[in-house]
Image: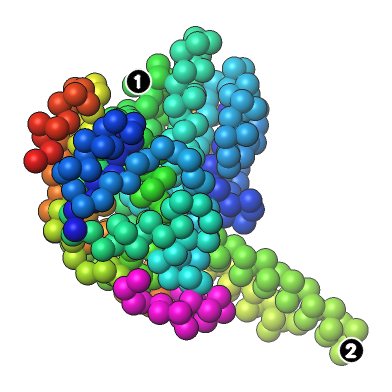
Amino acid sequence: MTTVFINASPKKKLGASEYLLKVQRLFVRAKKIKEKLMTKADHSRILEKLKDADSVVFSLPLYVDGIPSHVLEFMEKMELFCKEHGISLKVYAISNGGFIEGKQNKGVLDVFKNFCLRSGNEWGGGIGVGGGVMLHVMRLVLRLQIVLLLARVLYNGIFNDDWLPTKAINRFVVSVLVILFFNLGVFLFMHLLGRAITKGMAVKNKYTRIMIPSFIFIPIAATFFFVFSIIKGGIFKGWLRKK
Amino acid sequence: MRVIIHDLDKSYDELLKGKCDLTIMADGEYAPCQGCFDCWLKTPAKCKIKDKLVEVCRIVGKADEIVIVTRNFYGTYSPEIKNIIDRSIGISTTFSTYRKGQMHHVSRYGWHSLLMIVSYGEHSEEEKATFMHIAERNALNHSFKNTKNVFIASKDELLEVIA
């Protein structure tokens, strides 16, 4: 079994789609090929990889309730390519949105299913993830915490001859557990989807989210945007006004 | 103001001009959205990509009625049309609110009256259902009071369905 994993985020690196695809790959036992779809220049390279594949997994961001335009362009090419070469793949998709409700990704998964019907491919199912951006930010926070923990261990070891700062380690373990909890839904459904991909089976679409109530999520998101609007300067340029 | 966004050629553009205040021809001669959020965070309602869509959200935002004419593309917009929609997210602000129990963005321009989508070409029943779902979601997200989907087999029927 060969599976092509396509990160279809237009961002060069550090996008939520990349993170979710990395997690999904962990749950698949097959020959895994990684691909990145950003522009038209990527089309022919990716299509060639599909020739010898059994399945393909798209990971993409939700753009205005649907699929980003650069991914739609690729799908049209893929339909023609599959028909021309008699290719029929199992297609899976992971869609992530900034809103907290995973269900808001339904349109994306439905369009992929329609695409499969038209292109002669087989829809294998997908996952809609809410709060994908925040899950991704959590990953970055975890990385920062690892660096800080190592710095603390080194500092305490060198200056206080204490190479096991229990308080700092405990705080780090708690942080890891909290982040794991936020990701529980993603891990569960990616485990199920991964099993289906490994076996070449189809599953029903699943919807999940970061494990935070929306009344907490929304103020956090607003604070995030507020801070970045100050840093980037938009807040001083008629941030909320009609233009 | 009524704006028609379409993915047809210049001859149709001329015909559609008589049906609205402004047309936007989706010819694909512009870059896709990069997801940078600068149209929220850095230059409100203005895209950082300096091509012909740089201020498209200011036009879409001020329209009371938007009519989108698109070829049916697996039950959604063609890539050329979707690109314009993606580049228009500055019509909302960064702030969020609840609508029908779900999280959505607050509009920068207030409520619009109608989002009408005319899709042409062959449609399966599944594609029609998907398109109606997407129209409803777009209206909720971008503050349109009403939506209308019209499915036509050929673009020749276009002028009959757009009053």
Residue B68's tag is none
Placement of A72 over or under B110, stated as above or below: above
Q: Look at label 2 and name its amino acid.
A: Phe
Label 1 close to label 2 by CB (< 8 Å): no
| Quadrant where the C terminus of chain B is found in the figure | top left
* Magenta-drawn segment: A224-243
Which chain is mark 2 on?
A
Quick check: do tags 1 and 2 share a chain? yes
Pointer 1 chain: A
**Residue picked out by circle 2:** A159
Q: Secondary structure at mark 1?
A: helix
Dot 2: element? helix
Mark 1 and mark 2: span between their CA atoms?
67 Å
One can see residue A204 in this view: no
Residue A200 part of the magenta-drawn span? no
- Mark 1 highlights which residue? A118
**Residue A209 in which image quadrant:** bottom left
